[in-house]
Amino acid sequence: MRILIFAVIISLSAAFAAAQQPTACEKTIARAFGDAGAYFSDPHDGDPIDLTVGLTALGNADPNDLTLGDSHLYASISDPNARSFIYIPPGGKLIKIKDHQKGDSVYVGRFGNGDSYSIIQFPALKQTLCVHHMINVELKDVQADGRIKFGAMGTGGGGGGEWSFRTVDSSKRPPTIWHPSFHYHFEMFAGLASSLDDAKERVPFTALCTDLAKKGF
């Protein structure tokens, strides 16, 4: 019995240690959509850990329900003051929003609470990504790796995106310190949606990750 208990402890310890690292898919999406050092957290990939808040499931994360738990792109896994631009990787197409508000970019829509969103289609995958909380949205420079810069992170019209970012300082009591920070929110849908009404069936990031990895991200 002691041997069995010891084996279980070793197994749990190994799983706990593994959970402290982003998954391969999370790393791929961070490289494809963010600046160097960006971190992506997907609570539906079998590892519901968000390292910006410590070893804690994000929201009501449920790997079997894509509507529970949020997928976020952060500028850094450890620096709450970092900021990242956001990019469209090769294969993605930024869609003009038909009912955009006066004064907004044609690529920005608004939820009822004023939060911003943009729509990126991936025609080869027949899937669509909806991204929330961008500011300064417009098609900008094409990068050497083929990505197109199209938005920024922070206050000033994006709406939402604020986040309590956790760091640890062992010299303080309690050691956990919370900092205000920002993120982008990602939701993936089946089909090529041109509006929120078209975006109905949530799908995992698996196909997108596979496609991006083949392209070197």
Image (cartoon, rainbow, N blue to C red):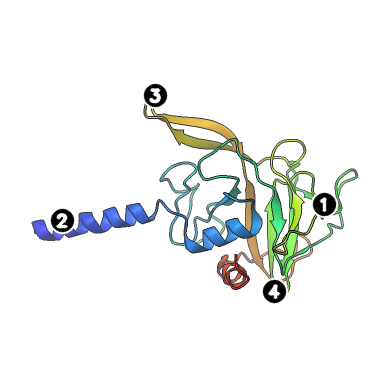
Indicate whether 209 appears above or below 82: below
Marks 1 and 3 close (CB-CB < 8 Å): no
Could you say which disc has been placed on residue 172 in the image? Answer: 3
- Extreme left residue here? 1
Image position of 183 (left or right of 142) = left
Give the residue type at disc 3.
Answer: Lys
Q: CA distance from mark 4 to mark 3?
A: 50 Å
Judging depth in this view, the residue of 158 and 91 nearest the camera is 91
Count residues near mark 2 (Cα–Cα under 10 Å), then give few for <14, some for 14-19, many for 20+: few
Give the percent coordinates (x, y) of residue 23: 47, 60
Q: Which residue is mark 4?
A: 126
Image position of 137 (left or right of 129) = right
Marks 2 and 3 close (CB-CB < 8 Å): no
Q: CA distance from mark 4 to mark 1?
A: 23 Å
Who comes first in sequence, dot 4 or dot 1?
4
Helix, strand or loop for disc 4: loop
Would you say residue 196 is visible in this rendering? no
Q: Quadrant of the C terminus?
A: bottom right
Count residues near mark 4 (Cα–Cα under 10 Å), then give few for <14, some for 14-19, many for 20+: few
**Mark 4 or 3, closer to the camera:** 3
Q: CA distance from mark 2 to mark 3?
A: 34 Å
Could you say which disc has been placed on residue 190 in the image? Answer: none
Give the residue type at disc 2.
Answer: Phe
Q: Quadrant of the N terminus?
A: bottom left
Who comes first in sequence, dot 1 or dot 2?
2
Q: Which residue is mark 1?
A: 138
Q: Which residue is mark 2?
A: 6
Q: CA distance from mark 1 to mark 2?
A: 56 Å
Give the residue type at disc 4.
Answer: Lys
Count residues near mark 1 (Cα–Cα under 10 Å), then give few for <14, some for 14-19, many for 20+: some
Residue appearing at x 53%, y 58% in the figure: 27
